Amino acid sequence: MSTLATPETSRPVGLARLSFANRQALSGYLLVLPALLLLLGLVAYPFFFAITISFTDRVVGEAGHWVGLKNFRYLFNQPSFIKTVTNTIVLVVVADIAKLCIGLGLAVLLNQAVPGRGLMRAVVLLPWAMPGFIAFLVWKLLFTPIGGGLNLILTDTGIYTGIIDWLGQKSTALPAVIIATVWRGFPFWAISFLAALQGVPQELYEAAKIDGATAWQRFRHITLPSIRPVILIVTLMSSIWTANSFENVWIMTQGGPSDATMVFPVLAYFGMQTQRLGEAAAVSVAMIPALLILVFFVTWLIKDDD
Amino acid sequence: MSDRSSRLTQSRLSRRQMLGGIAGGVAAGGLLPGILQAKSAPALIQSGGKLTFWGGLIFSDEANKMLTDTVNAWGKANGVQTDVVMINQNETNQKVSAAVESGTMPDALDMGLDLLLLLSASKQLTPVDDLYDKIGAAQGGWHESVDASLAPAKFGGSRNGIPFGAGGNVLFGRKDILDEAGITAMPKTWQELSDDAAKAQKPGVFGMGFALSNVGDGNLQVSVLQSYGGRIADDAGKKCMIKSAQTKTYMEWVKAAWDKKLFPPGATTWDGAGDNTAYLSGQAIFIANTGSVTIKAQEDDPDLAKSTIYSALPAGPVMQVSPIGPNVRAIPKSTKDVARAKALIEHLTQPDFLKEYYKVAIYGPVLKDQDDFEAFNTPVLGGLRDLVLHDTPPGAPDVYNTAYADFSANFVVPKMIQRMVVDGLSIDDAIDEAQKQGDAIYAKYA
Amino acid sequence: MESIESRTTLPATFERGWSRARRKPKLRKLGSLVGVYVIMLIVAAIVIFPIYWMFTISLKLPREIYRLPSLVPQAPTLDNYRELIEKKHFLVNIRNSLIVASSVTVVSLLVSSFAAYSIVRFRYRFRGLIGRVILLTYLTPSSLLFIPLSIIVARLHLGNSLFGLIVLYLTFSIPLSTWLLSGYFRSVPPDLEEQAMVDGTSQLGALFRILLPLSLPGLAAVGIFTFTGAWNELLFALIFITSEDKRTVPIGLQYLITGDVLLWGPIMAGAVLAALPVMVLYFLAQRFMVQGVTAGSVKG
């Protein structure tokens, strides 16, 4: 039918397409506008405002003057700075890997038709369901050397009867913070992956089964590629969260002992305590290039998919 | 000058905001039209007969309620609509920063000395010298230590707050455990304290429940360091002087105590409640506390409260350092009706009110006439009164200025100790590092 | 090619496959089922232990919390819950958080669906850039924003109001929701919408009648994230809410840490109560997630 109509209707169709394209563009802009305006006004604008603050000696109540890179020089010369950088990277990378493995594994598990998975899905969500600072207070209690839950388990079961100062010694402080961070954060990954898995057509698996693909092959060649964009976005979002998260470290260790858990947001908080907005802003701004690289890398990977 | 300049920058700011690209224009202008005006009723806009007061929330429900009720009763009697909000002290700094920047400060508010210092430096407060003198004259005069803490020289030449209570640390000791070890008196020096602690300590109970972490309690170690003759800065308060033989002696004392395991595990990362929790858990023999532990113990664990004895903080080889921290009520620059705010603050210094209030609060007296209030007959509050009489203003023997406050807020001294006991740095290296950080901090204010 | 081969040898493989399928898969299935349960039990234990600990503390009086730490409460009591609700007016906090979180969820899902729909299904200039800007806004540390935001919030008279909090929380939730939703929208084939539009449905109609119902699992997941995010947010709430009657759940709990005293019992009781609405929401949302899958399979 279409081949028959081609000669006569080609011009009108072209015109219609053009106006359709225009109409489409207009509708497209209109639909994205509310989100865009809100974010430009309440995030992008204050964000650039904050960046300019980091180049001034602004304190609370006084606009301050342009001081160039002075705040950054002060920051880079602080004894805590190198540790802050490495701790933040270790925290983000290790926590991400752990959350990826646990989240993906659980999602695949919970996507199977096993009895009791409904209950399990609800259980998995529990850490996410309470305010973050409460979760970290609980972990602080668990890590308490005397009378804390972890040491009680160890002594009650006779595994180890000494006192382990989980948060107070260098070797265990950062791992302890990471454990609590992963515990609090993995539900987001598991539930995101689970929702994504439900979008993978079941027929693909059936077909692969018929072709004799092993479970691993099915996972590798069907599951992973299908949910790859979600994995990338979740990794990105969660990395940003973890890098910006303040409550975990602040509540459990305040960056101690001896900067073993010092991260950027806590360092910025110390700056805020003296109301030196320029210095505090510089701490947060110093982290942005790293986040930008991460964002561009991930969006590039996603674009690669399309 | 700075008043004008800050107003100038305010207007420049708003223009920049309006012109700051579409985003700013949209945000400030028409992003959320109509609804906003209709829906939101900002509580902080001062109109007609309304007065907003941010009180400092403390760990005593009774005291908080008494303060709120008194302000509201005053409002009723004077035809002023009062809006009292009790603000958690842990949040005051951030809330005030945001409120100053956005012009939404209350008409009067409670704050500690550090915030008073910062807000005075940025000229955010209304001078209240007249009221300060009037109240002092009416009630026997201000205590010398309180008066010295607020010396106009440090606050831009004026009195910018009216003190309403002095905080400070009292030494708590477990009488039952000390008795068992045959120790009958509370230690007079820090060396005695660590010796007693070592002697009385037993499994699961640690002698010295002092925080070595990055929280306010950790800065108690600054006072101990000073009592050993160490100093943070020179007499002018301009140059960091932490590196000294005296500081080294102090660090040796800490190291010895640490090696004898006198500090409870976790002390290097305790939060502000760490010493409270350790003491209430029966895990600490000595702690230094403002008095909240007493309230809590009396409520929850009367046996513990009964077996607690109190004394002033011990002295070091050079002197005794136990600074007071006056809490003040101040009036922001933005307040429209200053006279009314002053009237409220003056009303809140009435002996009739404070006589009852001090009984349930955790403050020492600030005015001489308050000394024989019944409230100060208890060991803890009496201890706080003794502290006030002892005449150690904040920071002394160092100069309490913005650099000192920055030094404290970055917990340089607790971190110096952590470097030594956690990272195993030598005493000299730890001190060198602290000196370097101190130099950087003091250089900012030179 | 493989399929042809298997088809040609179908009878033989069928015979063998059948007999094998009768035995081996069953055994394997049983084995893997046990494996699944073992893993699930381990995960559940790790997830639940801290929550169990929280729960036991919410049932203990201070003396027991401090002096007799134990894995099982010795003298359980509901006093902490009573104190929280009667003395600290925690139900007011819960009401405020419910208002804020549910409003944010509804508005955010709507606005983000529009934005994601636009980015995924429409062609126009700067589409890629706009998508990236939306994502980039997510990058900003809220600790960096709070001073500039407090100025804007004051200008817009949004301070100390739940409405203001709702607007602020949208800035967290929209980037996340838009990105997650565009992922889900992409996985839905456009044929059905195109068919509907040929049949005369408007673009918005196609979104609401075809795309959104097909994306229910995604919407449910995104809705949960948005709700919990808004339910649990502390920093902005602390800074922008002042009045006692407007405090949300996290502020209410934060105020149980007064100066240097932590009220462990009431805090943990509050945490238990705070987790409940999110759990209820999750159970509700889970139904939609299942429905969404069914809708998708009907189409197939």
Image (tube, coloured by chain):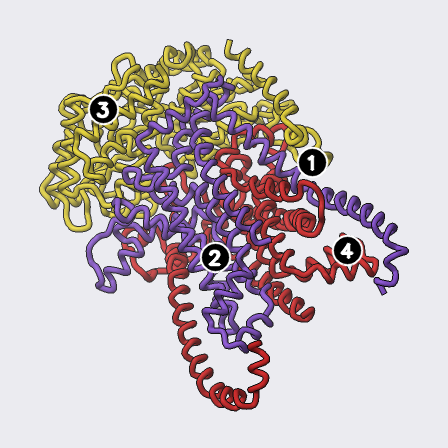
Determine the chain carrying the residue at label 1.
B
Decide which of C19, A72 is in the foreground and name it: C19
The disc at residue B32 is 1
Residue to which mark 4 is pinned? C205
Dots 3 and 1 on the same chain? yes
Q: Amino acid at mark 1?
A: Leu
Decide which of C157, C184 is in the foreground and name it: C184
> Is C15 placed above or below B130 here?
below
Contact (CB < 8 A) between labels 2 and 3?
no
The location of residue C197, given as percent across then percent down, is 79, 57
Decide which of C258, B224 is in the foreground and name it: B224
Q: Secondary structure at mark 1?
A: loop
Determine the chain carrying the residue at label 4.
C
Q: Colour of chain B?
A: yellow
Determine the chain carrying the residue at label 3.
B
Dots 2 and 3 on the same chain? no
Judge from the rendering whether residue B209 lies leftward or rightward of residue C231; answer left or right. left
Q: Quadrant of residue C36?
A: bottom left
Work out whether residue B9 can be spotted: yes
Q: Quadrant of the N terminus of chain C?
A: bottom right
Contact (CB < 8 A) between labels 3 and 4?
no
Work out whether residue C89 can be spotted: no
Judge from the rendering whether residue B108 lies leftward or rightward of residue B49; answer left or right. left
> Is B104 placed above or below C125 here?
above
Residue to which mark 3 is pinned? B321
Of the image marks 3 and 1, the number of the one nearer the N terminus: 1
Numbered disc in front, either 2 or 1: 2
Residue to which mark 2 is pinned? A187
